[in-house]
Image (spheres, rainbow, N blue to C red):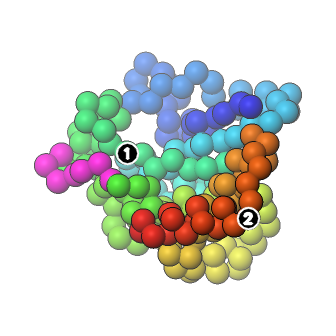
Amino acid sequence: MFAISTIRDDLLIANLKVGPIQKHHSTSDLVTVIGTIISFRIAGMICIPGEIREQVEQTIEYCLKLRPAFATANVFTPYPKLELTQYAIARGHLNPSRFTIPRNFFDGSVLNFDRHYNVFLTKSFCLLPSFVWFPALWHRRWCRRILYRIPQIVLRPIYELTYLTACKMIYCLRTLLRVALAMAARYVRSL
């Protein structure tokens, strides 16, 4: 199993010496090499300081282009003394006196994003695995519009079931459907 954690050259630093996130390979390198890899997953980061909606959509497009076995999105969490956290504070994306580390990614970002954009981010986080498995859901705009209108409380269990199913497939785990549903229900209760 091979994992890709960052896929955005423009936002995640083209010049390794200047930026807040260190990368070892460019996205084009990954696209070139990816054909030789049997199974891999992507955990792309979204909700990065200064990121806009179009860039999140580009991240999803990259994930679809790479065709991984599974993809998730990680919401940037500004831990103290992390270089990217300092970057966010310096550029006004994070108020250091107001933030706490979030309980989970499903509550949105602690960065200074408006409420509507935060909802878009959390829904993108939940929908990315489904988009990768069923690209037509992303490429057909009417499907995408419908999916982004589904309430977060419904998307969360869909995400959990998709994630569990992917883990079962990738790591050859065996889980009864009853256990899978119980796990999804536990996560929903934590909302």
**Which residue is drawn at the image coordinates 65% and 55% (left, top)?**
163
Outermost residue to the top? 17
Side (left or right) of 138 relative to 157: right
Q: Of residues 126 and 89, which is closer to you in this image?
A: 126
Tell me the chief SS of the magenta region.
Answer: loop
Give 173 or 153, whichever is nearer the viewer: 173
Q: Quadrant of the N terminus?
A: top right
Badge 1 marks a residue whose secondary structure is loop
User: x%, y% of residue 96?
Assistant: 18, 46
The image quarter containing residue 37 is top right
Q: Position of residue 46 (x, y in %)?
A: 50, 49
Residue tagged 1 = 77
Q: Look at the image and give the residue range highlighted in magenta.
A: 96-102
User: Which class describes the residues within 10 Å of circle 1: few (<14), some (14-19), or many (20+)?
Assistant: some
Task: Kindly indicate whether the residue at mark 1 contacts the one at mark 2 (C-beta within 8 angstroms).
Answer: no
**On residue 104, which mark appears?**
none
Residue shown at the point (73%, 54%) measured from the top left: 175
